Amino acid sequence: MGAAVNKINKWLKEKTFHYKDFNIPDLVRIKEEKNLKISLCFPTLNEEKTIGKSVVMMKSELMLRHKLIDEIAVIDSGSTDSTCVIAKEFGAQVYNSADYLKDEGYYKGKGENMWKALYLLKGDIIVFIDADISNIHHRFAYGLLGPLLQNPDIRYVKAFYSRPFQNEKGIAPSGGGRVTEILIRPLFSQFFPSLTGIVQPLSGECAGYREIFENISFPVGYGVETGMLIDIYKKWGLDAIAQTNLDLRIHRNQDIASLGKMSFGILQTFWKRLNKYKKDLSLSPEALTLRQMSMQDSGGYEISEKLIEEIERKPIIEVPDYKNRNK
Amino acid sequence: MYSDFPKVLKDFECLKKDLSSVISATREMILSNLSMISQIPAFTFEEKKRSEFILEKFAEAGIPDPSTDIMYNALGKIENSKTAKTILITAHMDNPFDEAIDQNISIRENKVFGMDMAEDNLALAALTTLPDILARSKMQIKSNLSLLATTRSHGKGDFEGMRYYLNNLDKKPDCVIHLSGITFGKIDYFTLSRVRCDIKSKFNIPSEMAWVRSTHDSAIVVINEVINAILSIPLPRQPKSVINLGMINGGERYSTVSREASINIEFLSEKDNITDSVITQINDYCMDIGARHGVEVRANFFGRHHAAGINCSHPLIKVSIEIIKSLGFEPIIEYSCSEITVPLSMGIPTVSIGVATGTGGKTPEAYINTETIEKGILQLLALIYMIDNGCCSE
């Protein structure tokens, strides 16, 4: 294995956490010692089935029982169902995204709501959690806050989940989902190899310090997770990033057509960053190494490398023996 | 004494404002616990994970050393004095759904929807949140409170969790408050004599096409005869007795003679001797019908409970009724087939009360009215206060 992959695996070992590594009273104590304010944001669009439970759970466990979070906000893209009414009923601050920063225009999308959260919320640390999680639990918030509060060098934390899938050995946990393994990890392998250690780059949940979020641009739609990750990595380096296993996450499954749309949006974000960071598009030997995620028997994750070189044959008409075959 | 009730109720009225605001402020805690409980499947006999969660919540609420036993009952004790009376407050943990069923709830503006949440999980959420509510309120209690989340209440669990707990106590509680879900306004304090029975007819022959064999020996035909025989059992109008043919199963496909069929029945009566007589008759019928068809017809009886209860003139019941009236509701008195049969048959004054209103059923459309939870919890606190101040003692 090369030095690059060793570096990624070292990072994986040091910066990959499990939500059970953290104890809420300890986190509250550190937060108070550091005099930090923490905001929790749910970007929403028509989430009436799950938003009530999400707000209730976070408020009960992380505001009433433990004073870890200072404010809970819903930033909405114009829901036509009862999302906003329900969120308000259970004490969340509710903002209609279109009503704020009007001079900057308005775009509909999760990234838009996250971007405006920086303007609307007061926290030094901001936690973003999707509002469509059926098995929402307060670990989704404190699991992300743990690495930020306990490690001064970590500025941004990304979630990942147990995603059981069937293989020849039976049930085994995989790395990411379909779009991650087919699109994102191969692209990262070629252009941003250090980021192949992120187990689920498309997970919707993350937390970070305000200074990180306020210095990067936010793709409005599907590319927000990938764009954010690449920009933070380029500006602050891999060591500023960590990831936490939040166990099982149950949410709506997307069909292939939706995943196709998502992939197309992500590709646009990607090409913009290839230009922005003046990436070499030639197929250097380094760029031919695919890095894939695998899970160790010990439960940890590791990146393995495989050289995949697509050799091409010229048109056979140019081969003399082909031309002379019938002579 | 019940005669003290009007004065104690007045004292409670002074606390009511504080308690209402505490309950209102802890509404999210109850719903959060309900949500987390619903995320942990607890099929009867498989309640361990849910039990661990309840113990964790009791500990988080400051209960010292919450404990469990071999049945995985979860117990939290708020002890005030060794000589004080003990009030046991219970709700069961198990439900009839395995891990494959999504029990996640959906919290809406005024309602919470979810599979089985209304009937089973809500009462458990109230029990789990009670230490948090008491810790935040100004209500002082002299009695010891034992908060018990029980296992094995459904079906063949046969209330084993509750029975094990009570049978292994050195000192029995002075009274028991049993919590149920969407039955707010209902008071249960007596149980009927009950037995459940699975009857199975089974032919030990290979699968055969109906066309080549007489269908008179089909297991379904045999079970049909058993049903007719059971329905011919004469039942008295008084004491009231009922046989319910709950479920039926049998057969394999259109074209083959059924080799196996079964029926699940429940018998309820106000008197135990009628239940005894019905058990004997069902056994006789099964033997007779089986012999005539040359097939094994086996009746397996389980879930036997004896008729037990306290009189409606018992101060615990009179006080429970008055509390519901004081909250602006008309109490409904009904029999129960719940775990209360266990303490009642041990002679422990027991009452079952509901936490909220709503609509039950084993579907995701089942719901609770969230705004009634406040009244339900207030009712529970009032009852604890009255028992603590002696109003429910004979």
Image (spheres, coloured by chain):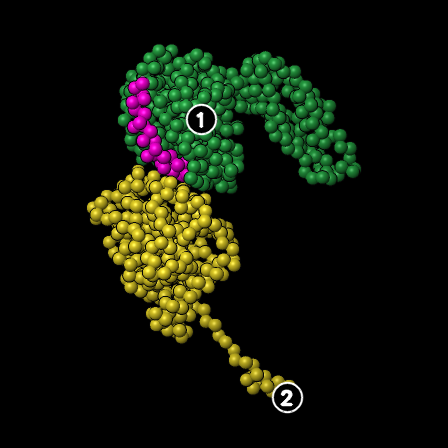
Chain colours: A yellow, B green
Q: Which residue is mark 2?
A: A327
Magenta residues: mostly which secondary structure? helix
Residue B66 is situated, as x and y percent measured from the top left of the image, at 34, 30
Q: Amino acid at mark 1?
A: Phe
Question: With A219 as the anchor, is B270 left or right in this view?
Answer: right
Is B20 covered by the magenta stretch? yes
Magenta part of the protein: which range? B10-38
Q: Residues within 10 Å of mark 1 (few under 14, many from 20)?
A: many
Residue B170 in view of the camera: no
Residue B25 is situated, as x and y percent measured from the top left of the image, at 32, 34
How far apart, in angstroms, are the residues tagged by discs 2 and 1? 98 Å
Residue at point 34%, 41% (across, down): A91
Frontmost of labels 2 and 1 is 1
Q: Amino acid at mark 2?
A: Lys
Residue B246 is situated, as x and y percent measured from the top left of the image, at 60, 28
- Please, what secondary structure does the residue beneath circle 2 have? loop
Residue B364 in view of the camera: yes
Q: In which quadrant of the rendered image does the N terminus of chain A lie?
A: bottom left
**Chain letter of disc 2 in the image:** A
Quadrant of the rendered structure where residue A65 is? top left
Residue at point 68%, 27% (across, down): B223
Query: Against A273, is B193 above or below?
Result: above
Q: Which residue is mark 1?
A: B184
Query: Against A78, is B361 above or below?
Result: above
For this orientation, the residue located farthest to the bottom is A327
| Cβ atoms at labels 2 and 1 below 8 Å apart | no
